[in-house]
Amino acid sequence: MVDPQGDLQMAGPAIALVVQPDTSIRREIATCLRDLGFSVSEFDDECRFYAQAIRLMSNPGCDRESMVILAEPTECAMRDLKTLRSCSLHTGIVLVDGPEHVTGEGKLRAARLRGDRPSRDDVERAVEAAFAASRAATQ
């Protein structure tokens, strides 16, 4: 949700899962998300991310609608994200740059974050777009 000043505001504890093999990019994005109030878990590969995502999804106390996943759109990550979406996962998904030939934002109801070094504003806009796309799919 965006407040009147244009800042992202979360209703409750918000969780961000960041999957990015490049340590410096992953840490920059994670820092931006922490500045926005997210509790952030960082992963350098899809296997650990997928295990954590399943663990969170199976927790009845997890507010899936306040969770966002930011992942480089590798073939493996796209497959995993499609699997999570097929389980009626209504959470924000942001595809972080990645190869141009890997597409699928529309089918995943995902936003795209482009650029090698995204700013806090870039991250915030992408997360808000991801939440909006996810909410629109449930209406």
Image: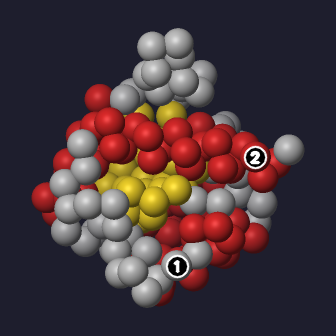
Identify the residue shown where x is 29% and y is 29%. Answer: 35
Identify the residue shown where x is 75% and y is 70%. Answer: 86
Q: Is 41 situated above or below 78? A: above
Q: Which mark is residue 120?
A: none
Is residue 34 visible to us here?
no
The kind of residue on which mark 2 rests is: Ala
Is residue 54 visible to us here?
yes
- Disc with the residue nearer the chain's start (2 vs 1): 1
Of all residues, the one furthest to the right in this rendering is: 139
Task: Indicate left or right for 18 with 92 as reference.
Answer: left
* Residue 78 locus on image (x, y percent): 53, 78
Q: Quadrant of residue 54?
A: bottom right
**Front residue (pair 4, 48):** 4
The kind of residue on which mark 1 rests is: Thr
Near mark 1 (Cα within 10 A), the count class, few <14, some 14-19 or many ≥20, is some
* Residue 59 locus on image (x, y percent): 65, 47
Mark 1 sits on what residue? 103
Provide the secondary structure element on which disc 2 rests.
helix
Quarter of the image where the C terminus is located: top right
Mark 2 sits on what residue? 136
Identify the residue shown where x is 43% and y is 74%. Answer: 73
